Structures are given as structure tokens and as C-alpha cells.
């Protein structure tokens, strides 16, 4: 279900719609960026577990042969070739 533009994964039988909306508002207030997805579940001890992810905008900074740069436009061909040969590590979204 989607509440206030946020994908919500929760057991609709356990939680009322107004409760879910309150959890989304709580997560929005406590996130650093744009909230995309939230998981809400009732634990065995009666507590509620809220798991959420937000998009925090950032600029990628690269370290190539000892100096930091954010933009590849000023690099010469040798630096661009070095960067293209490096192993790229991605960041996976949780599912």
C-alpha cells in the first residue's frame, strides 16, 4: 500500500490505517532525506518494529592516485582510462 507517497509493507489485519499513517509520519520526521519505503511489523513481545530507508542526496567523490575529485570532466585520457578499469561496487536497495 502507499501512504503519503511512501510504499508501506505491513500486515493490514494487525494495523489500522490511521496507525500506519502515524508510523509513516514518525519515519518521515526521523529520516534525513526523502522517505521511499517503510516496513512495519508486530514483534512477538508486542513491540512494533519500523524499518525505513530514505534517499539522502550526495555527491560521489573519487580518489584516483592520491587526490579527490567529484567530476570527471577535468580528467585527462589516462585518468579516465584508470577510472574505467576500476572495479565498481554498487549499493543494493533492500527488498
Image: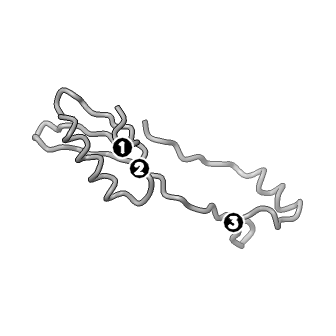
- Where is residue 12, by image quadrant? top left
Provide residue 19's location: percent of width, then percent of height.
Answer: 19, 41
Other-residue count near label 3 (Cα within 10 Å), few / some / many at <14 / 14–19 / ≥20: few
In the foreground, 5 or 81: 5
In the image, 24: left or right of 44?
A: right
Q: How many marks overall?
A: 3
At a point 34% along the width and 54% down the height, the residue shown is 28
In the image, residue 70 lies at what x, y percent? 69, 66
| Callout in the foreground (1, 3) | 1
Q: Nearer the viewer, residue 86 or 47?
A: 47
Rounded to the nearest whole Å, what is the CA distance between mark 1 and mark 3? 34 Å
The mark closer to the camera, 2 or 3, is 2
Q: Residue furthest right?
A: 77
Residue 1 x, y percent position in the rendering: 34, 31
Q: Which residue is mark 3?
A: 70
Name the residue: 10% across, 41% down.
45
Of the two numbered discs 2 and 1 on the same chain, state the one appearing first in sequence: 1
Q: Is residue 33 above or below residue 18?
A: below
Residue occupying the point 29% across, 47% down: 24
Give the residue at x 18% y 34%.
Answer: 15
Q: Quadrant of residue 50?
A: top left
- Dots 2 and 1: beta carbons under 8 Å? no
Q: Secondary structure at mark 2?
A: strand
Q: Which residue is mark 1?
A: 4
Mark 2 — residue?
35
Other residues around mark 2 within 10 Å, as few (<14) / some (14–19) / many (≥20)? many
Amino acid at each position: 500500500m502507499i501512504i503519503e507517497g511512501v510504499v508501506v509493507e505491513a500486515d493490514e489485519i494487525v494495523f489500522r490505517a490511521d496507525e500506519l499513517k502515524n508510523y509513516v509520519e514518525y519515519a518521515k520526521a526521523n529520516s534525513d532525506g526523502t522517505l521511499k519505503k517503510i516496513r512495519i511489523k508486530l514483534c512477538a513481545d508486542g513491540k512494533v518494529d519500523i524499518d525505513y530507508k530514505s534517499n539522502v542526496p550526495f555527491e560521489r567523490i573519487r580518489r584516483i592516485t592520491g587526490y579527490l575529485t567529484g567530476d570527471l570532466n577535468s580528467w585527462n585520457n589516462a585518468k579516465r582510462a584508470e577510472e574505467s578499469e576500476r572495479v565498481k561496487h554498487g549499493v543494493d536497495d533492500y527488498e
